[in-house]
Amino acid sequence: MSVSLTLARPEHLPVLLPLVADMHAHLGLQMTEEARRAALLPLLEGVPQGAVYLIGPARAPIGYAVLAFGWSIELGGMDGYLDELYVRPAVRGRGIATEVLLELPRALAGAGLKALHVEVDREDAQTQRIYRKTGFRPRERFMLMTRTF
């Protein structure tokens, strides 16, 4: 199987919004469609801080991945955070997420990315297995801490 990834653009917003709403409902995240639209549109318009990739056909994607970019002195340059990865429930279990997790780093390394990070629920062993299978490892000395404002 070969999953296609398409860099999402503003014209993809109508097919992307329902996927993001599904992901957020699955996770129990409360967010209005207006807030989702406001968070996604700058990424679709090409701000350098991140990108959205559609998984599968751009007209009818089966999922999406959202990346946020940063910089790490320790890791030697640009790094990224996989903020959201979603595959429609009807097509899960077919290795699609695994393919995406293998393909994204290859594509991004060509653009200079040095590392890709992901935040995983400590209790979600199945998701952790998928990430480990594709080369992600916990950082033994470090944990992610967040301050919101």
Image (cartoon, rainbow, N blue to C red):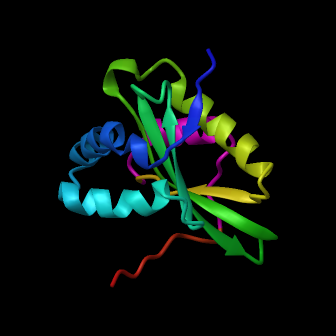
Q: Quadrant of residue 92?
A: top left
Question: 113 and 33: which one is in front?
Answer: 33
Provide the residue span drawn in magenta: 122-140
Is 28 left or right of 37, judged from the image as shown? left
Residue 130 in magenta? yes
Q: Residue at x 38, y 49 (%)?
A: 123
Give the left or right position of residue 18, taking residue 108 as reference.
Answer: left
Q: Position of residue 21 (x, y in %)?
A: 25, 45
Does residue 10 show up? yes
Count up the numbered dots. 0
Residue drawn at x 79%, y 58% is: 112
Relative depth, front residue between 140 and 42: 42
Q: Is residue 19 above or below residue 137?
A: above
Residue 31 in view here: no
Residue ranking furthest to the front: 11
**Where's residue 128, x and y in %?**
51, 43
Q: Is residue 147 above or below residue 129?
A: below
Quarter placement of the C terminus: bottom left
Q: Nearer the viewer, residue 82 or 55?
A: 55
State the residue lying farthest toward the top: 1
Query: Left or right: 57 with respect to 124?
Result: right
Q: Is residue 5 above or below residue 128?
A: above
Instruction: Give yes or no for residue 29 being in the magenta stretch.
Output: no
Q: Position of residue 86 (x, y in %)?
A: 41, 39
**Quadrant of the snapshot with the N terminus:** top right
Q: Please report the residue visible at 25 percent of the width from the left and 63 percent of the height from the top.
A: 35
Q: Residue 34: image x %, image y %?
A: 21, 60
